[in-house]
Image (cartoon, rainbow, N blue to C red):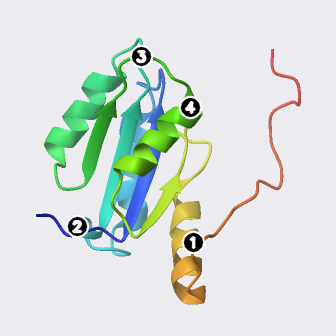
Amino acid sequence: MRNSPLLSIVIPVYWNSGTLELIYEEIVKTFDGEVDKDQLEIVFIDDASGDNSYEILCDLADRDPGRVRVLQLSRNFGSHPAVLAGLRYCSGKYAAVIGADLQEHPDLVRRMLREAENAESEVVLACRAAREESRIKV
């Protein structure tokens, strides 16, 4: 039986084939030296993407089987149900949710983890101070 990791990063995926390798590499690079490999779990939830996201995720899991876990939902349920599925599936002492589109850098999760450990907090929240996109999306 596998020991529970310190941190699970939950990532809902929907048509993100172009960023999956990048987000994986950024997470690994960010946490390299911060936590042992077996203390980090990356849980990707494919929300029935119509591109090759699931195949890319399976390849990542094959290359890094101790750290990468993949769920594939039977149909598109939406981001929130995908996140909830990932949170139910993950096994870390702490869990963080980030997007597969690279809008949140994994360093934010690293800083939040340190805050949770240092303050012995059960919950740490981050709030975006500014956005670079317009308020109206076309």
Question: Which amino acid type corresponds to the residue marked 3 in the rendered image?
Answer: Arg
Question: Which amino acid type corresponds to the residue marked 4 in the rendered image?
Answer: Ser
Q: If you read the primary sequence from the N terminus, does the residue marked by circle 1 or circle 2 appear first?
A: 2
Which mark's residue is nearer the viewer, 1 or 2? 2
Q: If you read the primary sequence from the N terminus, does the residue marked by circle 2 or circle 4 appear first?
A: 2
Circle 4 sits in a helix, a strand or a loop, which is it? helix
* Residue 88 image offset from top left, x and y in percent: 40, 49
62 above or below 3? above
Residue identifier under label 1? 111
Spatial separation of the CA atoms under disc 2 and disc 4: 27 Å
> For mark 4, does the 10 Å Cα neighbourhood hold few (<14), some (14 to 19), or many (20 or more) residues?
some
Q: Residue 134 falls in which quadrant of the image?
A: top right
Q: Residue furthest left?
A: 1
Q: Residue at x 51, y 68 (%)?
A: 110
15 above or below 35? above
Q: Residue at x 38, y 59 (%)?
A: 29
Q: Quadrant of the C terminus?
A: top right
Residue identifier under label 2? 38
Residue identifier under label 4? 79
108 above or below 77? below
* Residue 106 image offset from top left, x and y in percent: 51, 56
Identify the mark at residue 75; answer none if there is no mark: 3
Question: Which amino acid type corresponds to the residue marked 2 in the rendered image?
Answer: Asp
Label 1 close to label 3 by CB (< 8 Å): no
Circle 3 sits in a helix, a strand or a loop, which is it? loop
Spatial separation of the CA atoms under disc 2 and disc 3: 31 Å
Which mark's residue is nearer the viewer, 2 or 4? 4
Q: If you read the primary sequence from the N terminus, does the residue marked by circle 4 or circle 1 appear first?
A: 4
